[in-house]
Image (cartoon, rainbow, N blue to C red):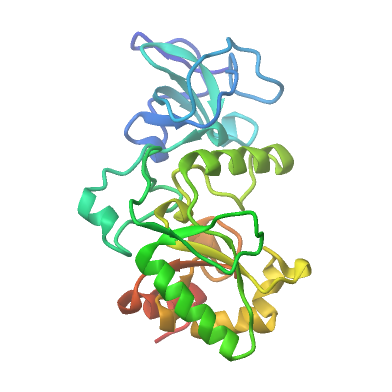
Amino acid sequence: MTRILMFGLILAAGCAPAPAGAAEHGRLLLIGQPTLWLEPGPGEPNGPPMNWKAGTELTVFADCPPEAAHGETWFQVGQDAPAGWLPEACLSLPPVDFDESSLRAIGQARVDRTAGLPPNYAPDDLVSVGPRYEQDRDYKLRAEAAEALAAMLAAAKADGHTLYVVSGYRPWSVQQTLYERKVKAAGRDQKTVAKPGHSEHQLGTAVDLTDGNEETLLRVSFGESPAGRWLREHAWEFGFAQSYTEHNEAETGYQPEPWHFRYWGIDQARTKHLRALGVEE
């Protein structure tokens, strides 16, 4: 049984009116173009098909917590009126109200599971970076981050470690594709790919790196490779910090990624890096 809020009246029992704490503003963004459910729970979607586009902002009319809906949080959504239910994995928190100066300043914007970027946000100073792991790809970073990356990769090479760029800036739409692909492969409870708008890659200051070894490519084992250890010891010297570590997994909600580094600038990087690793200064 579910409890549905409609025209201000609660019609049944089990779920609650108004959004959960994570959706405190009562609005959520649609990821992809899923079919709605008539009520929360397992099974295939059985509600009406909708023509909302990805990134559409929807009103939350009710929520259903995991203990009442087979381990998942569900939201009853619509535009002018309730239309159906969607699991949390199909929805994203709305963008934080960033001002232009905080987005332009390096290292000022908070981007994580609860603070996101608008679907149309893209930096205006992106430049190509390399060397590229995939030669047919054009990886980009913001100009300052790109300059710092070039210096870091040159220093790594001087110490005997050749590193390649495997990912840089990603627009909201690309992150959406990656997220939906991962959910389809690993389930709606996957914890490795961020929702669109909530990936540091959209900032244009985050980069994924590899030493070219396919066995450690985008794997936790990269952290224990010679190149991975070099990055852990020296990345902060060039303004970069590892974002997702074993130490901060409970805080970030993401599994460790020893290949993923965000550029913060020299002033912040050492503190950010050591904090992520759980090292006291």
Residue at 34% x, 78% y is: 266
Residue sitting farthest toward the bottom: 159
Total numbered labels placed on residues in the image = 0
Residue sitting farthest toward the front: 136
Residue at 26% x, 43% y is: 97
Whether residue 7 sits left or right of residue 250 in the image: it is left
Residue sitting farthest toward the right: 215
Whether residue 155 sits left or right of residue 227 in the image: it is left
Q: Quadrant of residue 258?
A: bottom right
Residue at 47% x, 75% y is: 150
Image coordinates of residue 186 in percent, x first then y, are: 72, 44
Vertical comparison of 127 with 222: above or below: above
Image coordinates of residue 20 in percent, x first then y, are: 42, 34
Image coordinates of residue 242 in percent, x first then y, are: 50, 71
Whether residue 265 sits left or right of residue 146 in the image: it is left
Image coordinates of residue 53 in percent, x first then y, are: 48, 23
**Image quarter hosting the C terminus:** bottom left
Toward the viewer: 33 or 3?
33
Toward the viewer: 47 or 127?
127
Vertical comparison of 195 with 107: above or below: above
**Image quarter hosting the N terminus:** top right
Vertical comparison of 109 with 115: above or below: below
Residue at 66% x, 43% y is: 182
Toward the viewer: 271 or 266?
266
